[in-house]
Structures are given as C-alpha cells and as structure tokens.
C-alpha cells in the first residue's frame, strides 16, 4: 500500500468522512480507515488513487467535472424550454376546455328549455285530443237524438 492517497472529488465542497473535500487532495494513507476508503471508492462522486496523483490527472478530473456541469446546465436549459412549451400547451388546452364547458352549459340550458317546451306541447296535444274526442261524442249523441227527415 502506498504511503499517500489522492482523493479526487467531482463535486468540490462535498463532505465525506467528516471533512469538506476540494477538487483534489493528497492525504497520508492512514488518514482514512479501510471502510471509509471503500465508501469513497463506491461513491461515483469520488476517485481514490493510491499515491500522489499527477497534476494532469487532477486537471483531467477537473475538466471532466466542468464538462459534466456544462452538459447538465445545457440539459437543464433544454428541459426548462420544454417545460415552458408544455405549460403553454396546457394553458391552451385549459382555455379550450373552459370554452367547451361553457358551450356544454349553454346546450344543456337550451335542452332543458326545449324539453319544457315539448312537455307543454304534449299537454296541448293531449288537451286538444280530449276536446276533439268530446266534440265527436257530442256530435254522435246529437246525431242519434235528432230526428231524421
């Protein structure tokens, strides 16, 4: 085992094992327990190198972290644009729904008025049929009671 270890943090400022980690730091090999080192190795935000890492490795890690941050920022901007478009579509759909509901309410009101009108007309028809039937009966009685010449 090397006498030193280098820990590269892809998100500088993260806290692990009780300390805040810079982008890259070299520590004595005895600073962290085996369990802590295993946890660092398992965490994708950290890279553990036995020994001192050359400056180039640190710079590569930093450049990779910057590239990843830029890609994440670009993805976030794209997602914001898509969200804005989705919200606009949602608002348009809401307005269409409001109009459709208003039209539906108007049609229901018209339907109720027409049904009331139909019921009134049905009653008129029934009354006229009853009056017609009464007139027929009266005419038939009158025809039977009137003398024939």
Image: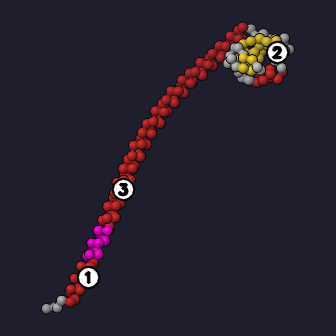
Which span of residues is magenta-colored?
A: 123-132
Q: Nearer the viewer, residue 68 or 118?
A: 118
> Where is residue 74 shown, x and y percent of the image?
56, 21
Q: From what the image shows, is residue 60 above or below residue 121?
A: above
Per the image, the residue denoted by label 1 is 137
Q: Secondary structure at mark 2?
A: loop
Q: Main secondary structure of the magenta part?
A: helix
Local secondary structure at mark 1: helix
Residue 93 spot, x, y in % from top left:
45, 39
Q: Is residue 89 left or right of residue 130?
A: right
Q: Residues within 10 Å of mark 2 (few under 14, many from 20)?
A: few
Q: Which residue is mark 3?
A: 111
Q: Residue at coordinates 26% horizontally, 75% vertically from top-left? A: 131
Q: Is residue 42 visible?
A: yes
Counting from the top left corner in percent of width and height, residue 38 is at: 80, 23
C-alpha span from label 3 to label 2? 83 Å
In the rendered image, which quarter contains the N terminus?
top right
Disc 3 on helix, strand or loop? helix
- Depth order, front residue of 138/15: 15
* Residue in the picture at 37% in, 51% down: 107
Find residue 108 and report its horizontal and vertical position in percent: 38, 53
For disc 2, the marked residue is: 31
């Amino acid at each position: 085992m090397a006498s030193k270890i280098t820990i590269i943090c892809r998100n500088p400022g993260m806290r692990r094992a009780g300390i805040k980690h810079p982008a890259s730091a070299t520590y004595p090999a005895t600073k962290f327990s085996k369990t802590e080192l295993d946890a660092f190795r398992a965490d994708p935000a950290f890279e553990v190198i036995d020994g001192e890492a050359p400056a180039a490795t640190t710079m590569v890690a930093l450049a990779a972290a910057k590239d990843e941050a830029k890609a994440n920022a670009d993805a976030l901007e794209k997602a914001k644009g898509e969200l804005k478009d989705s919200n606009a579509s949602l608002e348009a759909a809401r307005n269409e729904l409001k109009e459709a509901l208003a039209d539906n309410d108007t049609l229901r009101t018209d339907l109720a008025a027409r049904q009331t009108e139909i019921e009134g007309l049905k009653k008129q028809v029934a009354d006229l049929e009853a009056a017609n039937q009464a007139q027929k009966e009266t005419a038939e009685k009158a025809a039977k009671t009137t003398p024939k010449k």
